[in-house]
Image: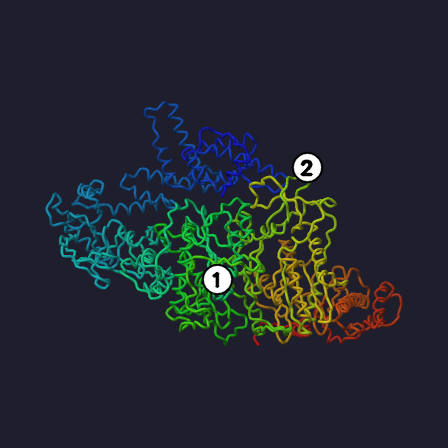
Amino acid sequence: MTDNKASITEIVPALSKITDHKLNGTNYLEWSKTIRVYLHSVEKDDHLTMETPDNETRKTWIRDDARLFLQIRNSIDSEIVGLLNHCEFVKELMDYLEFLYSGKGNLSRMYDVCKAFYRVEKEAKSLTTYFMDFKKTYEELNVLLPFSTDIKVQQTQREKMVVMSFLIGLPSEFETAKSQILSSSEIGSLQEVFNRILRTEGTSSIQQTNNPGHTKKYCKKLQNCNKRNQIANVATATSTSSSSFDKTVMVSADEFAKFSQYQESLKISTPVTTLAETCKTCLISSSNKWVIDSGATNHMTDNPKTFSSFRSHLASSPVTIADGSTSNVVGSRTVKPTSSITLSSVLSLPKLAFNLISVSKLTKDLNCCISFFLDHCLFQDLMTKQIIGKGHVYDGLYILDAWVPRSVACSSIASSVKAHCRLGHPSLPVLKKLCPQFHSLPSFNCESCHFAKHHYSSLSPRVNKRAESIFELVHFDVWGPCPITSKTGFRYFVTFVDDFSRMTWIYFMKNRSEVFSHFCAFCAEIKTHDNGKEYMSNSLQSYMTQHGILHQSSCVDTPSQNGVAERKNRHLLETARALLFQMKVPKQFWADAISIACFLINRMPSTVLNDPIPYSILFPKKSLFPVEPRIFGSTCYVRDVRPSVTKLDPKALKCVFLGYSRLQKGYRCFSPDLNKYVVSTDVVFSEDTPFYSSPPNSESEGEGENWLIYQETIPSTPTDSSEQPQAVVDLLPAPAKPPIVQEYSSHQETKDTCPAPTSSLSDPPSDLDLPIGLHKDSVSIPKTVKKALNHPGWYNAMLEEIQALEVNHTWNRVDLPIGKNVVGCKWVFAIKVNPNGSVARLKARLVAEGYAQTYGVDYSNTFSPVARLASVHLIISITASQHWPLHQLDIKNAFLHGDLQEEVYMEQPPGFVAQVEYGKVCHLRKSLYGLKQSPRAWFGKFSEMIQEFGMNKSKVDHSVFYRQSANGIILLVVYVDDIVITGSDCAGISSLKLFMHSKFHTKDLGELKYFLGVEVSRSKRGIFLSQRKYVLDLLAETGKMEAKPCSTPMIPNVHLTKDDGDPFDNLERYKRLVGKLNYLTVTCPDIAYAVSIVNADWAGSKADRRSTTGFCVFVGGNLVSWKSKKQNVVSRSSAESENRAMAQATCEIMWLYHLLIEIGIKTPMPAKLGCDNQAAIHIASNPVYHERTKHIEVDCHFIREKIQENLISTSYVKTGEQLGDIFTKALNGTRVEYFCNKLGMINIYAPA
């Protein structure tokens, strides 16, 4: 692999450094000032404040930035350059160096500078040297504490200077306290710092007789103890051997009497100190609480209720107490003061009433750290980063709380057996490292581990040198095929292992040909894997050759050469077997077991890395476990959030726990009753109860008992060429989607003849589907290309788009001809969702910046037809009445199939600029999204290909195609790249699908479920259209999710004018919401003033007195078309406005009539046209002319002509039955509900 920076160096000649004084980490101020002066001198200051511009100077700016980048880099010491490989622009470089070396926010650096400033002296230096040193220190102090005109900032800076002066004056024995204060994020006020120092002085003072100020620094006995490396700052045990330390220092009787009275009054532990010979620490008190002592070398107690084990000591050492008596150490004990903290080797002193915890011993035994704050302290496990205990300050002492943390298994109440099962059956050494409370466990016996992990011997150890950085070397291997297809339809998985961190990624596959799509996610890192034929495809080899990737394969039948990936596969399978065997989980869930095994192994200490955790290496700031680990295969109860659940139904679903969601904080469970995966945090576990009570039947499972075995070699049989590679975004297998309307769902049966369509429980699992509980809000759209490249899901989507562009030969990289215009491009990201709001896949689209095109040069004609929604409604209505199947297809990268007629040049895609073709442009051969002529080019190509199959283009709606034959009829409607197919010729539909798949890269989505944001559900009662998810998103956007529903769209009898109310603060947001509400009328005609009969609100607008036309057309009793629009002229009578409305409705009826006749659907005529205005009916039916009809003569003739042709017949509708009132007036709730029922609107989500 090549380094990006190296490639730039090859293109741009080496430039001289800006200054001879290279940055070495200590001279940042002088160096940065020199750099900024230089940039100012060459008028390039903007490179320090802005990123890449979007205007026409972008290319020149990038070239100048690269040159400046190299000059600055040449002015940096070689030891620092290695830290800057991630920087691409000058601004990033300078900001990162400022973060590293400026010292801003670094209290320790601020302390050192202040100390140097206050203590700078001339000594033997010359006056000039002394002045330069003083000025240098003063300038650095100004950087750390810059002057501000803000009074509050000045007060804060003054407080810091006072605190620094106070700390500088403290002697050396307070260095520990000063280090703790300066290592915190905020230094605090002077009073807070004084309180912390005062507590430190109290614990370090030694009252020897009546000598005040006698501290450890001046204690000769403690100084001698230091030589023995046994430091004690409070009290120590005595030794019976004679030496120069025979004399024991005591407090006076009066002092001890007063101290005892003080203890009795407070009922709290207060330290009493003494000194003895052996320098072992203890602290005496009258309390049974555990005191956290940083000066103690051993834990000490004599509370018999806390002993869990005891080991006597034959040779004991007496400990002198403050009252002069001594107590012998009679043994050591294991004590568990809290459920999450276990103390080993606790010294037992019969006369000791105060329990002491040694900080040094505790941190070593439990591999934790203790952070001390003003009023509390926290115990944090260094492995899991979880809080395992805490304490509080009482009268100057830190007392351990009897607190049970909500943390991972290492801090839970669970036994070692339960922790072993929760964490995926790790080995005993790994369990001890991850959970220190089990460090004294001598052995561990797990029957499932014996069955799952028994093997002959390990693979030969790899002798190659380990990689030195992340993703320098990546191994991968394929396992499969599995004789049992997983629940989600997979039979293979490919494993990617980073050699440096040993972090593992798993992608599940339905066939081996999908390796290429997964390989693209790691194309810049992979170097070593074995020689399976799935790796040797031409597309894979050409892709690696094109991107300069070194492909190192292992020899045939020598899997040990790729030992890292092979051993990782074995480890995954051993863990998966243990998980399945332990809870008797059926083998069809093997993919879930592999997924959770990978999840847990990434979070276990690695012996190869000498105990670091792979996940923590890549993500040091993230928590290991977003939720508490649970036992795989155990019974759980998940909150049932389906809309059909009533108040009397059970509120939970009984499920089996199968893992965790990678992109969502929740548990991944499976409900056999619904045959669905569910991700939720509202889960109650019964970990001791397996969901499956007996082992699965091997015959029903498929292939015997030994299917989940470690395979060292991969079968190299050729793959089926019809199998298309598909990319997997989520590491977990994709679950099936939930039904849209459960009460109307039933299983679909497959027959040879054309079956009656039924609604299945689930769609075919999509290879790009994410967990079903993952909603759109949990995935954010990246704002920059850099953020997208750093996200695995978006990166895979971008790679998939680039791969599609290159496979379709969309462009050729050439030098830009002189005088030609170049078009920019950008990435557009979108989240494709399912009808229930869960994420279906992440989509990245490369879009050309078509606004830069010039008419007549880069494009000419741009018009492209799209299907009318009325056509879609009509075809669905015909399908429902004829009981035809309804299919849906999606054409991936549809615009890429269109051929460009013009000569168009575009910049290379951001983030995917080929190194060997730097500076070139893309000569477009195919239409690309964003180009003005792309829709026309695509539709022309599609229309040409579909007519080649024998389909006819409708003259009424060019987006509707049809074919009639002896076998039946086929109807097709296309809306850009979404296609709906129906008809009675099932064999012809199958042939049409195969033909389209051969011409375009189509994706068969099965039965129509979701089209243009409209949810489609089917039952015996018919086909139902809804926009439930669209409405929920709209409510969430406007903050109306918790609002109470209203029974009427508007307040009755209200008339609004443009002068009413206050102006909108955000007019753009208002326009956007109006547009969204307008699209909602696709399934909600009640809010669009559309009616089932013609009606006009004469002079309804108070502002301009124009009338409103509203009509709705039914075909076969189904609502297919409606409209509400203000008339463009003022009507002088109600008859006039009604006649104009009748004319528009007649046009719509005739349009639908001609479409029906063209596609071969017989329609009884005449169509009924209802109206509640007698005058308008008479004018339309009779040749009546007078002055009031002159201005509407054209409309009158048009309607009268259709009546004479027997295509239209008018009828009168009573005012009480006038459904048009709902679209022209604000009615009460009762009338609104009545009219909605007449329109055929129902709530399909309401309980039956």
Extreme front residue here? 556
Q: How is the image coloured?
A: rainbow
Q: Is 1006 located above or below residue 529 in the figure?
A: below
Query: Which mark identifies residue 818?
Result: 2
Viewer-side label of 2, 1:
1
| In the image: residue 882, left or right of residue 403 | right
Q: Nearer the viewer, residue 1099 or 991?
A: 991
Query: Any mark on residue 193, and which?
Result: none
Residue 981 coordinates in the image, percent (x, y): 67, 66
Q: How much space separates mark 2 and mark 1, taking CA atoms? A: 55 Å
Task: In the rendered view, tell whether residue 67 sits above or below residue 256.
Answer: above
Residue 571: quarter of image? bottom left
Looking at this view, is 374 or 558 the one in front? 558
608 over 755 or under it: above or below: above
SS label for mark 1:
loop
Looking at numbered disc 2 in the image, what kind of residue is underneath it? Ile
Farthest left residue? 242
Label 1: which residue? 481
Is residue 469 shown to the viewer in this render?
yes
Do callouts 2 and 1 mark residues in contact (Cβ within 8 Å)? no
Q: Can residue 784 be seen in this view?
A: no
- 297 sits left or right of 1135 in the view: left
The location of residue 297, given as percent across then percent down, is 23, 50
Q: Name above or below for residue 889 compared with residue 60.
A: below
For the C terminus, which image quadrant? Answer: bottom right
- The residue lying at 42 percent from left, 55 percent from top is 566
Crowd class of label 2 (few under 14; some 14 to 19; many from 20; radius 10 Å): few
Residue 208 placement, left or right of 644:
left
Q: Which comes before the other along the chain, label 2 or label 1? A: 1
Q: x, y (%) of residue 769?
A: 54, 61
